[in-house]
Image (cartoon, rainbow, N blue to C red):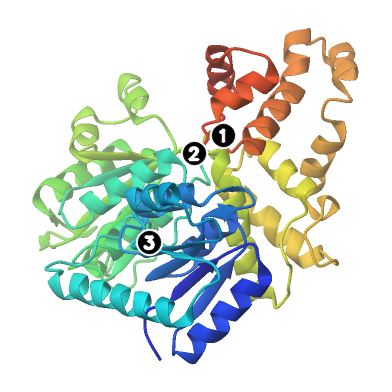
Amino acid sequence: MNNNRILIVDDDNIIRNSLQDMLELEGFSCGEADCFREALAELERHNYSIIITDINLPDNNGLELLKSIKKYYPDIVPIVITGYGSIVNAVDAVREGAFEYITKPIDDAKLKACLNRAIEKIAIKRDNAMVKPKNCIIREIVGNDLKMMKIFEMIDSAAPTKATVLITGKSGTGKSLTARAIHQMSDRSNAPFIEVSCGTLSETLLESELFGHSKGAFTGANSDKEGKFLAANGGTIFLDEINSASPALQLKLLRVIQERQFEPVGSNTTQTVDVRILLATNKDLSQMVSDGEFREDLYYRINVINIHLPQLSERISDIPVLADNFLRKMCEYHGKKFAGFTEEAMQTLEQYNWPGNVRELENAIERAVVLGRSNHIVLSDLPDHIYEQRQSSGVSASDSLYKESISLKKALESPEKAIIMAALKKFQWNRNKTAEVLEINRTTLYKKMKYYNLAGN
């Protein structure tokens, strides 16, 4: 079996099937997608070495897919196929990163020769790699939004170092996944990764949990206990909710961060560890410093590299990819099958505010998978509060104005946001075309997108 997996992207089912049959006979493993969005989702799900894509896709131009591959998946070798073989298309495709350009009807011999050249290129690139390949897209963290791309780059840069990293963001944004990604991409990946939720333990128990204790140190300490710092020796320790640490514990943490030394509770024996320290908080530590609730010296010591994770409402364009990813995972876990989401269900997911962020979306998808009975996730499969928001959106504006005494401007925001979002999606986030259709100028559109956190691609 050839270990170079190929993704076939074409809206023609016959072409996809014939290509897959031919390539699998040649020993390749294949995946397929019928549009731009599904191709991006498939690239998130699996590792591919080669992509064969039509230049004309139903929801976008194939050149846009080439741009995405060139930017976010530079190790993939793209081959373009089209029934419209013009020199202009060929030049554009090559400019956007296409390895070669083949016209329809596809000649099997030419395609095989092209694939052999692509495989040779991949082999040379692998042989010349002097370091572990850069993995900008972290498998466990899904996202194509520009904010997430910058975070992936920060993770990729910080992971191989020994630097302390502070991960900030609201609950449910993926702080634990980010910490694990940093550990997995570091040279400590084969050593322990120890996670401690500081907010779930009392001060005494937390100190014992982190540093261990000697027998008789306090009531109930019937034997010596090894702490998490010692358990993480040689690896990584992740301290979540660090904002909840008491002043006394903060002082002890400052020492272990600076010197990698500590004493277990009730002991005078100094322990020394080699450990990478990652921390996370959903609070504003700088404000806590100003309020006298967090040590200033500790804050500056842990805030060497700050990775701030955006709320899901700030990366709306990632919702379809995240939803598809969670759907696949939950179907595998619960042993069920769904072809995808209905358009109405997906629009509802994109328009909801998601106060619980990515975790809330994951829970909503799991509920839909467990309770869903058709071959697609439909609107009524979603949690009641999300479904009801859809039912009341726009229609209840007058009721809200009457019952809650809100302004007309506020009452109209929800339908306005939905209209702008629908237009942006229809025109593949082309702001000029969207502004033209909505009969507003581009500056007004940009301001409204910023106001509604419609970041786009």
- Looking at the image, which is closer to me, 179 or 343? 343
State the separation of the CA atoms marked 3 and 1: 63 Å
Nearest to N terminus: mark 3 or mark 1: 3
Q: Residue at x 70, y 34 (%)?
A: 422
**In the rendering, at what x and y percent does residue 215 appear?**
27, 69
State the separation of the CA atoms marked 2 and 3: 57 Å
Which residue is the site of mark 3?
A: 219
Looking at the image, how many numbered discs can be counted on the residues?
3
Which residue is the site of mark 2?
A: 457
| Foreground: disc 2 or disc 1 | 1
Q: Report the side of 130 relative to 342 (left or right).
A: left
Q: Looking at the picture, which amino acid does disc 1 mark?
A: Trp
- Looking at the image, which is closer to me, 92 or 403? 92
Q: Looking at the picture, which amino acid does disc 3 mark?
A: Thr
The reply to whether callout 2 and callout 3 are in contact (CB within 8 Å) is no
- Looking at the image, which is closer to me, 392 or 252? 392
- Classify mark 3: helix, strand or loop: loop
Nearest to N terminus: mark 2 or mark 3: 3
Q: Residue at x 51, y 32 (%)?
A: 455
Q: What label does residue 429 carry, if any?
A: 1
Quadrant of the image containing the N terminus: bottom left
